[in-house]
Image (spheres, grey):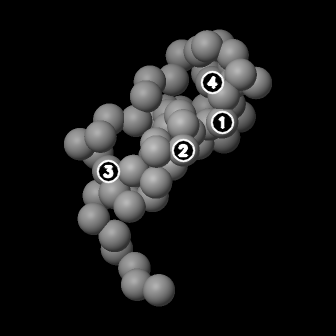
């Protein structure tokens, strides 16, 4: 996967509302795996990151 070909969010966590809103717009959500931002971005460029698992999306933790 080439990152330039997608609208992508890379994160370690995400709330359910944001997860479903982004997915409905065709945004790919990837699980940030790495100790540093540099490492995560390098892994993303190489196509080594996995899609964010739906079951890891959590209930909202803050209120607007």
**Quick one: quadrant of the N terminus?**
top right
Q: Is residue 7 left or right of residue 23?
A: right
Which mark, by number, is residue 34?
none
Q: Which residue is mark 3?
A: 57
Q: CA distance from mark 1 to mark 2?
A: 9 Å
Q: Earlier in the sequence, mark 1 or mark 4?
A: 1
Residue at figure coordinates x 34%, y 57% from the top left:
16
Q: CA distance from mark 2 to mark 3?
A: 17 Å
Labels 4 & 2 near each other (Cβ < 8 A): no
x and y, in percent, of residue 3 in the image? 69, 24
Which SS class for mark 3? loop
Labels 1 & 2 near each other (Cβ < 8 A): yes
Which SS class for mark 2? loop
Extreme-left residue of the structure: 55
Q: Quadrant of residue 26?
A: top right
Q: Earlier in the sequence, mark 2 or mark 3?
A: 2
Labels 1 & 4 near each other (Cβ < 8 A): no
Question: As rendered, which of 22 and 50 lies closer to the eye?
Answer: 22
Which SS class for mark 4? helix
Q: Earlier in the sequence, mark 4 or mark 3?
A: 4
Which mark's residue is nearer the viewer, 2 or 3? 2
Q: Which residue is mark 1?
A: 7
Relative height, residue 43 to residue 29 (above, below): above
Residue at figure coordinates x 23%, y 42% from the top left:
55
x and y, in percent, of residue 45 in the image? 69, 19
Which mark, by number, is residue 25?
2
x and y, in percent, of residue 62 in the image? 40, 79
Q: Is residue 50 left or right of residue 41?
A: left
Which SS class for mark 1? loop
Q: Earlier in the sequence, mark 1 or mark 3?
A: 1
Relative height, residue 56 to residue 30 (above, below): below
């Amino acid at each position: 996967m080439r990152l330039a070909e997608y609208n992508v969010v890379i994160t370690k966590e995400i709330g359910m509302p944001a997860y479903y809103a982004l997915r409905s717009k065709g945004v790919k959500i990837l699980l940030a795996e790495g100790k540093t931002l540099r490492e995560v971005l390098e892994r993303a460029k190489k196509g080594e990151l996995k899609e964010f698992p739906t079951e890891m999306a959590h209930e909202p933790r803050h209120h607007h």
